[in-house]
Amino acid sequence: NKRAAARQPTPPPPAPPAPAWAPGDLVKIEGFGAAAVVAADGASCAVALRGWETPDGEDAVLHCEAAALEPLDDDHRDDGSKKVVGVDRAPGAEVRDGALVLVSPAAAGAAPFGSAHHKDAFLLFRALCKLSMKGGPDADASGAEPISMQSKVLSLELLLSVVEHAGPAFRRGPRFVGAVRQYLCVSLLKNCTSHVTHVVALSLRLFVALVDGFRGRLKSEVEVFISHIFLRILDSGNSTHEHKLLVLEVFHRLCNDVDGLVELFLSYDADFDSIDIFRHIVVALARVVKGPSDKPGAAETATEQGKGAARNDAALRRLALSGLVTTLTSLARACDVDAGDAGTETGDDDVETRGEGPEPPSLARASSSQPRLAPPPS
């Protein structure tokens, strides 16, 4: 018995108890900077970050373990800039219901890949997302790097195919959903504001596919895209006619989905902690239908440039009006009300938005309107 007891390993020393924090304590977190404790419940705490804010401009809240907090030094200084939850990358944290949740390394590795094929798919998807982010706005506008632009377009087309044909393992797996949130959403934020219309069209098609397949898992990301990107493109006087037309087509497709439109209202407008996305979309469509307040005079419309601008404005107003009709038709279907023949059941291709002049870009033609590789020199 004495020999058996001697062979038994010595038990490890007990872990030190987590520090006790109280609301109001000033702490710091690695990777996030200074914060103030707002709630403490044993081993878990909720802190308000000084260097982060929500898209609404409110203080960002981070949920973490008490052991991850350290006392704030007296000589600690912040740089004064603030990052936005859901837009800027949060190291080691996830966005859940508008708040940041610190994920420990053990928890991050608790969801291994189901097979080697799942791991390869994850690595390939992440590589395509990183490839689609290469190429700055200067290169996009000047066309000085055609190979880089062709690589960006090809990677966006492949990502669109991946998202549109994703199966349950991709749409529900935590590793894949995290990759969509961490890599693909960041890529779309950059490419949606590109100067190249074809890149914008592909990015918007990707956003529509994300809404269809990941609507319930990307609530905060969808809110940021609509409120901070699309609505600002419509309201900005510096946005091109092609970019506004593409955004209106995105809204048209969102409003044509009966179940998606109802879920959009319930997820945001019926949630007191979220922005009224549905209301903002309807107001933006109505504002486009009404047109600009300062209409050009007869002398300006007599020129070719004035006629082209008038045709572009008319195409925007027709598509925005079609979006409002589609919204009412979808709401009528959701309420089992006979809306009659509203002329919106045949899809986007039957909507008369083209007018005279050259054919504007469309989301339906985004994957084939630009060649991938230039022909070799003769």
Image (tube, rainbow, N blue to C red):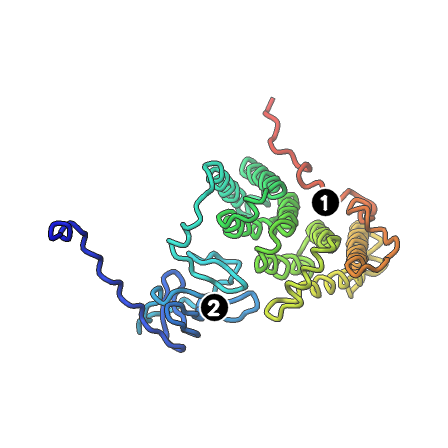
> Mark 1, residues whose alpha carbon is within 10 Å: few (<14), some, or many (≥20)?
many
Residue drawn 24% across the image and 62% down it: 14
Mark 1: secondary structure: loop
The disc at residue 61 is 2
- Residue 87 locus on image (x, y percent): 53, 58
Asked whether the viewer can see residue 212, the reply is: yes
- Residue 205 locus on image (x, y percent): 65, 46
Residue that lies at the very extreme toward the front in this rendered image: 1
Residue drawn 22% across the image and 61% down it: 13
Q: How far apart are marks 1 and 2 (CA)?
A: 40 Å
Q: In this view, does 6 lie to the left or right of 252?
A: left
Q: Of callouts 1 and 2, which one flags the residue occurring earlier in the amino acid sequence?
A: 2
Residue drawn 55% across the image and 44% down it: 170
Residue that lies at the very extreme toward the top in this rendered image: 378
Check disc 2 and give the amino acid type: Val
Cβ atoms under marks 1 and 2 closer than 8 Å: no
Residue 297 falls in image quadrant: bottom right
- Residue 303 locus on image (x, y percent): 82, 51
Residue annotated with mark 1? 362
Residue drawn 51% across the image and 62% down it: 85
Q: Which of 19 and 326 is in front in this view?
A: 19
Q: Is residue 146 left or right of residue 366?
A: left
Mark 2: secondary structure: strand
Check disc 1 and give the amino acid type: Ser
Q: Nearer the viewer, residue 348 or 51?
A: 348
Relative to 299, residue 148 above or below: above
Q: Nearer the viewer, residue 232 or 168?
A: 168
Relative to 227, residue 341 above or below: above
- Residue 278 locus on image (x, y percent): 70, 63
- The residue mark sitting in front, 1 or 2, is 2
> Mark 2, residues whose alpha carbon is within 10 Å: few (<14), some, or many (≥20)?
many
